[in-house]
Image (cartoon, rainbow, N blue to C red):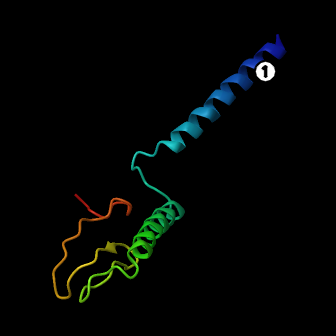
Amino acid sequence: MGAGIVSSSLGVLFYCSVLSCVYALIDADDVITRDEQIYLLLHAKRKCEQKVKSKMGKVAEGYCATQWDGILCWPEEAPGKLVPMQCPDYVYDFNHQ
């Protein structure tokens, strides 16, 4: 009888710990960690650097080349021209709507 109670208690304890782990994975605020944010930024930077390399030597004369500024990858454009850019989707909570 005592072994059955211990076994049941361990089962309940196991399920509670599993549920708490699952709950920790599902955060109500949908917050990402600092390391996850850095990973997303580095991934965007690599994609931009690939764009820069693919256009190397192909930028039209008098145009500014594609450039990474630490958050956004700015496209090739004529100097002095205003380039509208949307808030990047890889920066968590950048657009507070």
Q: In which quadrant of the rendered view does residue 17 lie?
A: top right
Dot 1 alpha-carbon crowd within 10 angstroms: few under 14, some 14 to 19, many 20 or more: few
- Taking the spot 79% from the left edge, 13% from the top edge, the residue there is 4
Q: Quadrant of the C terminus?
A: bottom left
Indicate the position of residue 70 as horizontal and vertical percent values: 40, 77
Left or right of 26 in this view: 18:
right
The residue under the point 49% across, 68% down is 42
Question: Is 80 on the left-hand or right-hand side of 52?
Answer: left
The foreground one among 95 and 71 is: 71
**Quadrant (top left/top right/bottom left/bottom right) for the N terminus:** top right
Which residue corresponds to the image point at 63% horizontal and 27% vertical from the top-left?
Answer: 15
**For residue 75, above or below residue 97:** below
Picture coordinates of residue 43, whole percent (x, y):
48, 64
Q: Secondary structure at mark 1?
A: helix
Q: Which residue is mark 1?
A: 6
Residue 40 in the image, given as x and y percentages of width and height: 46, 62
